[in-house]
Amino acid sequence: MFYRLGKLATRYRWWIIGFWLLTAVIALPFAPQASQVLKSGGFSSPDSESQRAIDVLTQKLHQSQTIVQIIFTSQRYSVDDPQFIDQTQQALRNLRSWDQVTSMTTFLDNPRQVSEDRHAGYVNIQLKVDTDNSPKLLPELKRRLQQVPDLQSSVGGSPVFYEDIQVVSENDLRRAELLAFPFAIIALLLVFRSVIAAILPALVGGFAVVISLALVFWLGHFTDLSIFVLNITTLFGLGLGVDYSLFIVSRFREELRRGHTVEDAVVLALETAGRAVAFSGLAVTIGLFGLTFFHINMLHSVGLGGIMVVLLAVVAALTLLPAMLTILGLRVNALPVRVPRLRRGVVPANNDVTLAGEIDAQHGYWYRLSQFVMRYPLRIFFPVLLLLIGFGLPFLGVRFSAPDASILPDYVPSRAAYNLLVARFNQRETTPILMAVQTKGNVLTPDNIKNLYYYVQRIEADPAVERVDSIVSADPRFTLDQYQLLYAHPDLIADPYVGTLLKSTVADNTMFVQVISKYGMVDPRSQTLVQTIRNTQPGHGITVLVDGGTAGDIDYVSSLYSDFPIAILVISITTYIVLFFLFRSVLLPLKAIIMNTLSILASYGALVLIFQDGFLHQILGFTPLGFVEASSPILLFCAIFGLSMDYEVFLLSRIQEAYWQTGDNKQAVALGLQRSGGIITSAAVIVIVVSACFATADMILVKALGLGMSLAVLIDATLVRGLLVPSTMRLLGKWNWWMPFAGMQRRPPVLSEATGEILTTGTDTKAGDIHVGGKR
């Protein structure tokens, strides 16, 4: 298949380039607009209890969960001063008459919205629109909010949070692109030492990114996609597009040095490196496909975006790149870059090559390293294995949480408002536990009031509860009989507080209850309280759904990690099957999966040390969270699993080629590592550089992904590939190539009697066919 693809690419090279140019020209106007159709939310599951509670409250009580908080502060006046109150009313005047406002609760309506020093108070404004569309109303809201002389106002809440996510994500992307492209070009110049050869991989990556972003713009009109698709698309498009092209261009130049014609070099490059690129892309796609199993839209849409860009990168590397190479031919080495050599013995680009394309391969660094490792396999295998496991041990102490404004930098409005609330207000009051309680029949019947009264008393008896706000706990002096008498004639209620509470929290068979915990939102004792409420059966036909910050956090983590084992299983099994057919070996795919897992485990440990415990936070420029954002390990697993498999496929492909040539497992490992070591290291450096550019992001979620990928690839390219792979393959010996099913054993390729080089890979030929010089 890859032989035929190579022949097609050389024959129809101008048509292929024309097609890609036309596609890019069509995509170019739409790619910059991709962010306009992306959503900032998508962190909740529609099936979670907290979301179902929101749905009930919205449907029955018409309560909007889209709340903007306006915080008024003054150094001169306290909230009790008439000047503070008058200026607050003046600032809000135009907002009260706005038709997009459902309700407004000021610190005058609820004294608990006053800061502890009484020099600040906040106002909750409920908007009619849903959370995803609420950022569109913010410009008008800020225009209507009047500035007053003695008060400072800060605007926060979920709409501002989602708007800031959008802005910060776009800024992070621009910064990463400005850094990544120049550094990638510099790295490619150092690898190829030719301007033309260095530009080709960058062009392939650029084409993949531009077309993918245009597809994201189109797809976003039909389904909800997360804003984080932008970062993933650019990260994978640039990193893998450059990587895949790097392998093919390198193999093309190698075949040219062996004396092949340009057309034959292209065909042979696709038959070998191109085949590995296709399987590698399939492995990465499988990893990202695992994200589509999650009910959280953010992960689901990131998986879709990642799959699109990876497939485009593979197709571009297998069609556009061979077409360009055919046209360039020997000019691929044009505009050479003179770089001082760091050591002697490096093979010049234009040297003639001897057996298997190596000049004295046994003196190469990777050959000597692998021979040393295979001389003492057990002494190296176990210490390195224990070291990688040790890197992952901090993950045992991980604490997961849902994202809030703390994942954003301090300079954005939502984070500034969040910091203000945390520093000056009772945080427990701003993050209550919300309950949607439904009864059989009207809530206000005497029997339902009785049942609800005793149910609320059971909740109040919990030592973690500060208080419960409901119609049956409005006044601790009231008895059950008094509540029943009071609500028998609701139209006659004279108390304004009770009347307002009844009107805002009860509708037919639905009642809204707030529980204030004695502890913070992410405190384990508050989480235990939520679970206790959920596990407490009210009886008498009463149903309860629990929402709020703590409940939403629990549901978010639970939804992610109930789906995660399924994703791991599907990814592992599918990857094993793909590698099984690629290498026709039972043990090599299993070894590759285990090696990948060790790299991921080490990056998980770093995730906890850095983002939860704050190690190096000053250098990396962020405030420690005290927890790990729950989706980060899942994103890392799906991304790194495929990316690490990328290098494993290229390495094992070269080892397998060497095994066909020599028939000696030990020699094959050493030769395969030597032949692939330099180019895989170069590819890894480029991915590390690109990922590190995304680690400069202000958004902690993106920073964690970029940093985690950089560390995992670094570990994979050094400890795993340089030490664990050769020691493991030495210990397994002939079992590396064991295939119990005789009919599935892969036919060895045809080798040149003169040079020992591969003339055909042996899998795509009919019986009796031999490819020599690109001909049958």
Image: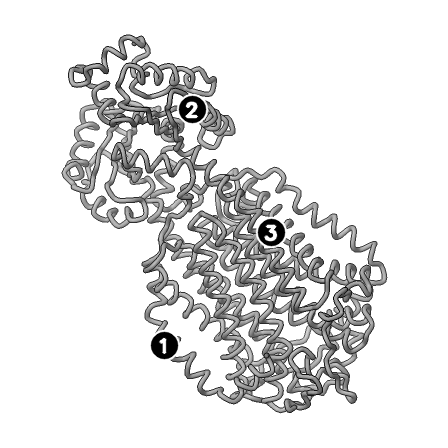
Question: How dense is the environment of label 3, judged by Cα within 10 Å: few (below 14), some, or many (20 and up)?
Answer: few
Q: Which mark is residue 517?
A: 2
Point out the tag, 3 or 2, that comes first from the N-terminus: 2
Point out the tag, 1 or 2, that comes first from the N-terminus: 1
Q: Which mark is residue 440?
A: none
Can you say whether 759 is above or below 232 in the image?
below
Residue at (80% x, 75% y) in the render: 362
The image position of residue 303, as x and y in percent, is 48, 57
The image position of residue 150, as x and y in percent, is 22, 34
Question: How dense is the environment of label 1, judged by Cα within 10 Å: few (below 14), some, or many (20 and up)?
Answer: few
Q: Which residue position is annotated with label 1?
A: 25
* Callouts 1 and 3 close, C-beta under 8 Å: no
Please indicate whether residue 463 sits to the left or right of residue 398 in the image.
left
Is residue 174 visible in the rendered image? The answer is: yes
Is residue 78 visible in the rendered image? The answer is: no
Please indicate whether residue 409 sits to the left or right of residue 770 in the image.
left
Residue type (three-letter) at the residue carrying disc 2? Ser
Residue at (81% x, 69% y) in the render: 665
Q: Which residue position is annotated with label 3?
A: 569
Q: Quadrant for residue 752, please give it.
A: bottom right
The image position of residue 76, as x and y in percent, is 26, 28
107 and 659: which is toward the camera: 659
Residue at (38% x, 42% y) in the render: 415
Please indicate whether residue 72 sits to the left or right of residue 256 in the image.
left
User: Which element carries disc 2, helix, strand or loop?
Assistant: strand
Residue type (three-letter) at the residue carrying disc 3? Leu
User: Which element carries disc 1, helix, strand or loop?
Assistant: helix
In what quadrant of the picture does the C terminus appear? bottom right
User: Which element carries disc 3, helix, strand or loop?
Assistant: helix
